[in-house]
Image: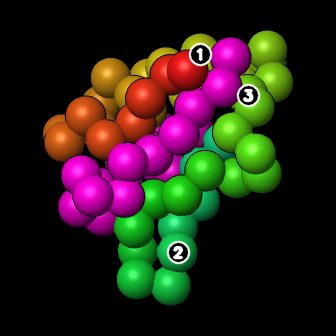
Amino acid sequence: MKVRIDSGRCQGHGRCYDLAPEVFGEDDEGYGQVRGDGDVAPVDERAARLAVSNCPERAIDIL
């Protein structure tokens, strides 16, 4: 599984990095960003999917 954040849609609510801190982090302005290259370890897939489903702007895509 691989994820990405559409920076044009992200509004910086922070749900992604609150729900899946192993997968997502925040930039200097509080907007979400994917850690590493976007590959999600199998152990973190459940948390990543939870973050995707809780993003109000639907700014996270599963590739």
Relative to 20, say whether 32 is above or below: below
CA separation in Å, label 3 and label 1: 10 Å
Which of the two discs, 3 and 1, labels the residue nearer the N terminus?
A: 3
Which residue matches tag 1? 46
Which of the two discs, 2 and 3, labels the residue nearer the N terminus?
A: 2
For image coordinates 79% across by 15% down, the residue present is 42
Three-letter residue code for mark 3: Val
Which of the two discs, 1 and 2, labels the residue nearer the N terminus?
A: 2
The colouring scheme, among rainbow, by chain, secondary structure or one colour, is rainbow
Three-letter residue code for mark 2: Asp
Is residue 36 in view from this perspective?
A: yes
For image coordinates 54% across by 58% down, the residue present is 33
Number of residues whose C-alpha sits closer than 10 Å to that of mark 2, classed few (under 14), some (14–19) or many (20 or more): few
Q: Secondary structure at mark 2?
A: loop
Secondary structure of the magenta portion, mostly?
loop
Q: Secondary structure at mark 3?
A: loop
Residue 51 on the magenta segment:
no
Q: In the displayed structure, does residue 25 sit left or right of residue 58?
A: right
Figure label count: 3
Number of residues whose C-alpha sits closer than 10 Å to that of mark 3, classed few (under 14), some (14–19) or many (20 or more): many
Q: Which residues are magenta?
A: 1-20
Q: Percent x, y for residue 28?
A: 50, 84
Front position in the image: 37 or 44: 37
Which residue matches tag 3? 40
Which residue matches tag 2? 27
